[in-house]
Each structure stands twice: as structure tokens, then as C-alpha cells.
Amino acid sequence: MPRVAPRPTPLTSAARLQLMWLASPALPVGGFSYSEGLEAAVDCGRVTTEAQAAAWLRDQLMLSVARADLAVVARAVPAWQRHDLARVRELNDWVGHTRESSELRLQTEQMGRSLVEWLRNRGGLARTDAGDDRLPQCAALPPAPTWPIAFALAVAQALPTPTTTADGEPALREALLSFTFGWAENMVQAAIKSVPLGQSAGQRILQGLIDAIPDAIDHALALPDTQRQAFTPMLAILSAQHETQYSRLFRS
């Protein structure tokens, strides 16, 4: 007989707090140390004002994050929930193969390893069965667990089964909000430090990203595997140039 999918369970306050925790800049994974090419864009004069920084980050959200890592998280969470290691490996390989510079590849691998270590030290975000071997499986992914895959595992531990919010919406969307807001907050801080900008300008940029995040998540959720992509040539060029930049605040 075909396996019956489990009925969605309500999202608890504790689980919601765990998702908020994953978006925290205090999470010790090193996200604050990367600008993802923004510092190189500042150095070459492409981003020098608040308006340019806002446009740059909004484009990166819609053209890069939504079409790549966010779409991977949307597929990896249910894969971890159903213990589908083959699917997880496929997605992890895709992330690693589509990093367009060594800096971007090292970032996703370093942050992925750091999150796995944090999960190990915490014993996971939620109590799991003694036979749950997903954490060692994630740690063993070759050549390393990437950031979207490790994040998806953290979500799957907080939400062991498909879950819905009070209004019946899938809790997966809440997880994607956490992932994207964490990215946005780190990138705004990178803009504040590198352009440089004031805190008020940073808050205005963050508001603009918050306004755009729901559409980015809708796009990621609807994106089939055949249309997922990581193709941002100018960002790749700037990231490669950053590797030899004379003076740097960030690791990418």
C-alpha cells in the first residue's frame, strides 16, 4: 500500500521561536563576515550611495537568493523531514557546483559546517528520536554540508513533520522567512560598514528588502528543479576580484 503522508500539525510557539533563532545575527555561523561581493562593488564604484545599495541588494534577493539558495531550502526541508538522503545529497551537490567563485563556495561550506557544529553542541533544535541519524549524515556530505542544506536540517529538527500556521498556511513559508530575513539583515550590515551608511539608511534598506521578501519566497516555492539557477555573472566577477582586493573588511 502507498505510504500515507502525515497530516500537518499546528506550528507551536516554541517551534516559531526556534525559526526566529535561526534568523538571529547572533547565530555563531559567521554570516556577518561575508559581503557576497558587495564590498567589491563598493570598491570599484558601483555602489556608493544608499539608493545604489538598496537596488543592489534587492536585485541580489530576486535574481540570486530567490532563484538559488532559497529554492534549495524549500526543497531540502521536506527532504530532511522524510529522511530522503539521496535528495539531500542531490541538492547539496547542486549548491556546491553552482558557486561561481572560490569565495562564494568557501562561504557556503564554512557556514554549513558551523551550523552543523552548533546543532551538534546543542543536541539539535528539538528533541528527536534516538535513532535519528540526520545530523551525522549532514556532517558527512561531501565535500561539506552547504549552508542551505544545513539550515534546512535545522528547520526539519524544529519542525519534524509538515506543519501549518494558525491560518492554515504551511510553516515551511515561516522557515523561508527566517532564512531570507537572516540573509537580509547580514547584507544590510555589510552595506552599512562598507559603503558606508548610517543606521537610519540601513533600516530603510532593510524595510525595502522586507517588502520584497514575500514575492521572493513565492517565486522560490513555485520554482521547479529545472528552472532553479545560480547565474549572476557580474556578481561572480566582483567576487573573484574581491579575492585579490588590496584592503578588505569582509571574507567575500
Image (cartoon, rainbow, N blue to C red):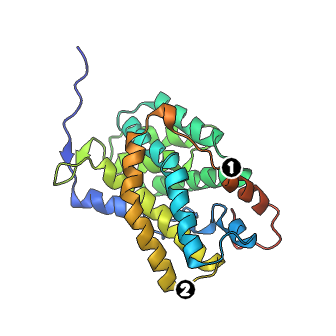
State left or right for residue 101 relative to residue 8: right
Image height of 138 relative to 44, above or below: above
Image quarter for residue 3?
Answer: top left
Query: In what element is the residue under mark 2?
Result: loop
Which three-letter amino acid code belongs to the residue tagged 2? Gly
Asked whether 217 or 186 is in front, the reply is 217
> For residue 77, what is the image quadrant?
top left
Circle 2 packing at 10 Å, graded few (<14), some (14-19), many (20+), is few
x, y percentage for residue 153? 43, 46
Question: Which label lies toward us, 2 or 1?
Answer: 1
- Out of 94 and 61, give the one closest to the viewer: 61
- The C terminus - image quarter: bottom right
Left or right for 143, reference 220:
right
Residue with the mark numbered 2: 198
Residue type marked 1 = Pro
Left or right: 2, with 222 as reference point: left
- At x 45%, y 72%, the residue is 206
Calculate the distance from the C-alpha at mark 2 to the C-alpha at mark 1. 29 Å
Please say whether residue 56 is visible from this viewpoint. Answer: yes
**Residue at (70, 73) in percent of width and height:** 249
Residue 123 position, x and y percent, is: 41, 53
